[in-house]
Amino acid sequence: MPPIVLCSACDVVQKKAALRRRERAHCVRCGAELYRAGPVSIDVPIALALTALVLLALTDSFPLVTLKLNGTSRTATLVDAALGLYQQGYAPMALLVAVTTMIVPGLEIGLLLYLLVPLRLGHRPAGFARLFRILGAIRPWGMVEVFMLGTLVALVKLSALAEIVTSTALWSCALLMFNLSALTTLTSTEQFWTWAQGADVR
Ligand SMILES: [Zn+2]
């Protein structure tokens, strides 16, 4: 029986065709992307996850912006922003900022490295299937891009009132957003199982 693939968007079953380099297969009915020419080297997502770790550390520890108004200046980090919301009585909002921009991206990167590095070395890590399911469940809660968009809108509005100097964390946050998107694309369920089967055979 030829290998088949199920469209995740419309459930139509299709025969899997061999692709040339850089080609992508799309669903015949709805046009959704089914799979890409592979296999992707496992070194690529590991390198991206390590880069994401550095970017997340920079985003969480350096100032996002400096506001200058009437001769005084105020610098804020991401942690300051969450703490500020908490101190002003917006505890649920502070929790949401901390979870979606710090805790979930940190967990996601940690889980990816825990799963990918042993596979690269030729064996499945303990709890592989369960941790992969947890990774899939927490991913939608990482919202660095939403935070970035909200921050940019706020900065444009504030620029009419005060001088705004963007700092290290804002740039690292922007890079982290692209990095996490690339990681999500490269570590699809199908791709993960291809690597896991390769590790079992070795
Ligand atoms: Zn489809």
Image (cartoon, helix red, strand yellow):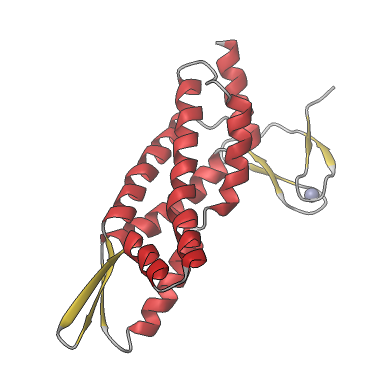
Residue 2, by quadrant, is top right
Q: Position of residue 19 (x, y in %)?
A: 65, 35
Q: Is residue 53 above or below residue 201?
A: below
- Which quadrant would the C terminus be assigned to in this image? top right
Q: Is residue 121 above or below residue 172?
A: above
In this rendered view, identify the residue nearer to me: 83 or 125: 83
Q: Does residue 124 appear in this view?
A: yes
Residue 61, by quadrant, is bottom left
Q: Is residue 5 above or below residue 11?
A: above
- Please give left or right for residue 80 compared with residue 13 in the image: left
Q: Residue at x 45, y 25 (%)?
A: 117
In this rendered view, identify the residue nearer to me: 60 or 95: 95
Q: Position of residue 80 (x, y in %)?
A: 32, 64
Q: Position of residue 92 (x, y in %)?
A: 52, 65
- Residue positioned most to the left: 71
- Which quadrant would the N terminus be assigned to in this image? top right
- Residue positioned most to the top: 202
Q: Residue at x 60, y 33 (%)?
A: 132
In this rendered view, identify the residue nearer to me: 87 or 112: 87
Q: Residue at x 44, y 77 (%)?
A: 153
- Please give left or right for residue 9 compared with residue 64 in the image: right
Q: Does residue 38 appear in this view?
A: no
Q: Is residue 118 above or below residue 36?
A: above
Q: Position of residue 152 (x, y in %)?
A: 41, 73
